Amino acid sequence: MIKAMTAVVVLLAAGLAWAQDGTPNDAQIAHIVVTANTVDIDAGKLAETKASNAEVKQFGETMVKDHTAVNKQATDLAKKLGVKPEDNATSRSLAQGGRDNLAHLKELKKGGDFDKAYVDHEVAYHQAVLDALDKTLIPSAKNEELKALMVKVQPAFVAHLDHAKMLQAQLGKSGA
């Protein structure tokens, strides 16, 4: 669970940093969105191969499919708008947190320990992403199309969080 909290701490710290230093610009928001999705795609790909629970494996597949689609929409929009996503401290921290999570998950044996760690991280990560979307990214976006894209995908993040919480409860009951 400690590794699962890495992403949460990064996103919460990012929100505090933006609150102190002003708000992220649209190019920074675009990079944060793409990075956050990429982190979940990478973890989902690992779950596709390493999860032992069929529902956890399917959840990983869903994360890859859904977050790849969001990244395509975000990159297509950035190209349309002529906005080059701008690397920033938050996106770098997210990427590092994703690498740390993958390293931790790769150390776990295939089976219940992996499944539980992956799902626990997904619960914490989706909650943190939702908080960042709702409290910082959507309110800070100046471009209406970028804002509309984030508003459009926000319910999918809620659904992912709910699904991850359901899996977490199931894994807890099964003792896995």
Image (cartoon, rainbow, N blue to C red):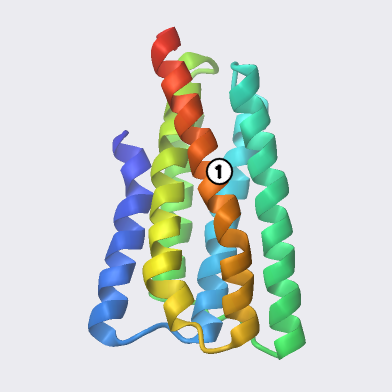
Would residue 146 be found to the left or right of residue 162 on screen? right
Numbered-mark total: 1
Q: Residue at x 73, y 46 (%)?
A: 65
Residue 80 location, x and y as percent? 76, 85
Image: 66 above or below 117: below
- Which residue is nearer to you in this view: 17 or 157? 157
Residue type highlighted by circle 1: His
- Which residue is nearer to you in this view: 46 or 71? 71
Crowdedness near tag 1: few (<14), some (14–19) or many (≥20) residues, C-alpha within 10 Å: many
Based on the displayed image, in which of its 4 quarters is residue 33 positioned?
A: bottom right
Q: Which residue is mark 1?
A: 160
Q: Residue at x 51, y 69 (%)?
A: 32
- Which residue is nearer to you in this view: 119 or 161? 161
Q: Residue at x 47, y 40 (%)?
A: 122
Residue 43 location, x and y as percent? 56, 41
Work out whether residue 107 can be spotted.
Answer: no
Image: 46 above or below 136: above
Residue 21 location, x and y as percent? 27, 85
- Which residue is nearer to you in this view: 169 or 11? 169
Based on the displayed image, in which of its 4 quarters is residue 83 positioned?
A: bottom right
Would residue 34 be found to the left or right of residue 88 on screen? right
